[in-house]
């Protein structure tokens, strides 16, 4: 049986892709992946909500995206000050 979300996507003609946890057959949540510095670069909960994140060499979050297709792009100067910001809602 399809969830309401899956049915909604089918009605919109959007093909559902498997989440990372589904591909890996993960059964314990929340599921996280960390980079070598301990930053959480992927998070997924049992409701299939996920977050992907990228960081620069100083640990600043430079990219964020979630399963609702919302994203943020950022750039930082050498002092860690944010110099660029853009999100999927077109707000700078």
Image (cartoon, grey):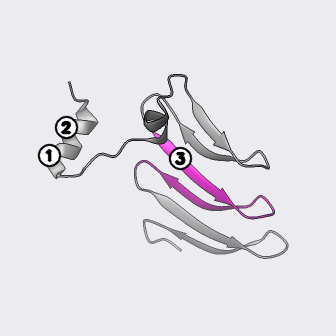
Crowding around mark 1 (Cα neighbors within 10 Å: few <14, some 14 to 19, many 20+) is: few
For the residue pair 8 and 82, the one nearer the viewer reads as 8
Name the residue beneath numbered marker 3.
51
Name the residue beneath numbered marker 1.
11
Name the residue beneath numbered marker 2.
7
Span colored in magenta: 49-68
Q: Quadrant of residue 33?
A: top right
Q: Estimate the spatial distance between the alpha carbons at disc 3 and disc 1, rounded to whole Å.
A: 24 Å
Q: Is residue 86 above or below residue 3?
A: below
Q: Which residue shows up at 44% across the image and 65% down it?
A: 88
Question: Tag 1 or tag 3, which sits nearer the N-term?
Answer: 1
Question: Tag 2 or tag 3, which sits nearer the N-term?
Answer: 2
The answer to whether the residues at label 3 and label 1 have Cβ atoms under 8 Å apart is no
The answer to whether the residues at label 3 and label 2 have Cβ atoms under 8 Å apart is no
Q: Is residue 83 above or below residue 51?
A: below
Q: Secondary structure at mark 3?
A: strand
Let me know if residue 61 is in the magenta part: yes
The answer to whether the residues at label 1 and label 2 have Cβ atoms under 8 Å apart is yes
Of the 4 image quadrants, the one containing the N terminus is: top left
């Amino acid at each position: 049986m399809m969830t309401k979300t899956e049915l909604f996507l089918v009605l919109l003609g959007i093909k559902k892709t498997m989440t990372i946890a589904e591909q890996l057959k993960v059964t314990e949540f929340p599921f996280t992946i960390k980079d070598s510095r301990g930053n959480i670069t992927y998070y997924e909960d049992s409701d299939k909500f996920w977050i992907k994140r990228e960081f620069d060499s100083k640990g600043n979050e430079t990219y964020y995206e979630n399963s609702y297709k919302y994203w943020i792009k950022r750039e930082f100067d050498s002092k860690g000050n944010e110099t660029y910001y853009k999100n999927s809602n077109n707000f700078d």
